[in-house]
Image (cartoon, helix red, strand yellow):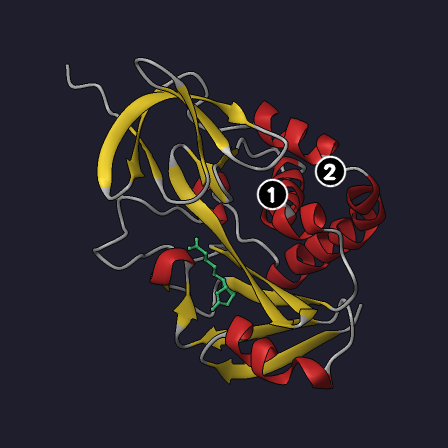
C-alpha cells in the first residue's frame, strides 16, 4: 500500500478516477487541500487542511457482494479506529460515522466499469482538528478534536486507518457477514423512529437493522421495507 501526497486537488476521488491507470491496487491518495470535495447524492464535502481526505484505489476482481458492501466495510474500519481512541461513535446507514448524532466522517465509493469492474475508488473524509464549520453544516458536523478536546495527529490517524483496512481486507473478502453484524451492533437510530425518502415522498417508520445485502430494513405501519439508497433522519421528539 503506497501513500501519495498531493498538495492541492479538487477531489481525491475524481483524481484517482481520472488517473487510476497510473496507480496500483491499494494505493492511497491524500491531499491537505481538497478544493471541491464530493459527497454522496451530489453533495459537497467540506474540509480544511486540519482534516483528513483520502481515497484508496482497489484494482482487482471482486465478487458482486464485496463490491456492494464496500462502503460498509470502510465504515466498519473507520469506526474501529475511532473506537480505539475511546470515542463513542455510531454508524449511520449507509456509511456515515456519527458522534452525538453529528457527522464525523463520510464515505463515497465510486466504481469504474468497462465491460467489467476496472477500479473502485473508496473516498473518505474525516473531520479531524477543525473547530469551525460553515453555517450550513455547523449544527450537523463534529470533528475528533471537538469530541475529545485534543489535537489529533492526522498522519497517524491515516496510517491507523490504512493498516486496519489492509489487515481486515482478506477477511472481508471471504466473509462479509461479520462486517454487517458489526454495523448492526453500532447502528445509529436502531429501533427508533426515522424519516426516509421513498419514491420522492418522505415516509416514516422504525429503523430495524441492515440486512446481508446492505439494505436498511424499516418497519412501517403495515410492512417491513428494505431501503436501497437515500438518506435517513431521526425524528426528533418535541417536548
Ligand atoms: C458523504 O458523506 O456524502 C461522503 C463524503 C466523502 C468525502 C470524501 S473526502 C475524500 C474523497 N474525495 C471526495 O471528493 N470525496 C471523498
x and y, in percent, of residue 183 in the image: 60, 32
Depth check: give the residue in front, 117 or 216.
117
Q: Is residue 211 above or below residue 120?
A: above
Name the residue rendered at 31%, 44% in the picture. Answer: 140
**Picture quadrant of residue 69:** top right
Mark 2 vs mark 1, foreground winner is 2
- Residue name at image x 50 percent, y 83 percent: 8
Task: Tell me whether circle 2 and circle 1 mark residues in contact (CB < 8 Å).
Answer: yes
Q: Position of residue 227 (x, y in %)?
A: 43, 35
Which of these two is toward me, 123 or 31?
123
- Quadrant including the C terminus: top left
Q: Secondary structure at mark 1?
A: helix
Drawn side of residue 125 relative to residue 232, left or right: right
On the image, the x and y values in percent for residue 133 come to 31, 57
- Which residue sits at x=66%, y=39%? 80
Residue 92: x, y in percent?
Answer: 46, 36
Q: Quadrant of residue 236?
A: top left
Front residue of 231/3: it is 231
Residue highlighted by disc 2: 176
Q: CA distance from mark 2 to mark 1?
A: 9 Å
Q: Quadrant of the N terminus?
A: bottom right
Q: Return the residue nearer the eye: 108 or 147.
A: 108
Vertical placement of 220 versus 75: above or below?
Answer: above
Amino acid at each position: 500500500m503506497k501513500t501519495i501526497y498531493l498538495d492541492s486537488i479538487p477531489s481525491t476521488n475524481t483524481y484517482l478516477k481520472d488517473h487510476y491507470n497510473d496507480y496500483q491496487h491499494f494505493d492511497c491518495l491524500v491531499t491537505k487541500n481538497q478544493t471541491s470535495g464530493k459527497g454522496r447524492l451530489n453533495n459537497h464535502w467540506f474540509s480544511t487542511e486540519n482534516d483528513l481526505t483520502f481515497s484508496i484505489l482497489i484494482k482487482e476482481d471482486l465478487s458482486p457482494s464485496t463490491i456492494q458492501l464496500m462502503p460498509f466495510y470502510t465504515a466498519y474500519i473507520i469506526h474501529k479506529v475511532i473506537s480505539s481512541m475511546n470515542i463513542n461513535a455510531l454508524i449511520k446507514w449507509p456509511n456515515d460515522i456519527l458522534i452525538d448524532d453529528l457527522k464525523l466522517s463520510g464515505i463515497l465509493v465510486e466504481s469504474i466499469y468497462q465491460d467489467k469492474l476496472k477500479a473502485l475508488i473508496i473516498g473518505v473524509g474525516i473531520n479531524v482538528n477543525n473547530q469551525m464549520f460553515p453555517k450550513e453544516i455547523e449544527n450537523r458536523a463534529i470533528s475528533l478534536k471537538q469530541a475529545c478536546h485534543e489535537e489529533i495527529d492526522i498522519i497517524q490517524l491515516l496510517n491507523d486507518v490504512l493498516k486496519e483496512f489492509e489487515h481486515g481486507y482478506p477477511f472481508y473478502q471471504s466473509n462479509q457477514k461479520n462486517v454487517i453484524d458489526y454495523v448492526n451492533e453500532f447502528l445509529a437510530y436502531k429501533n427508533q423512529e426515522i424519516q426516509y425518502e421513498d419514491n420522492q415522498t418522505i415516509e416514516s417508520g422504525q429503523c430495524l437493522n441492515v440486512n446481508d445485502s446492505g439494505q436498511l430494513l424499516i418497519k412501517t405501519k403495515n410492512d417491513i421495507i428494505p431501503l436501497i439508497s437515500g438518506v435517513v433522519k431521526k425524528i426528533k421528539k418535541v417536548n
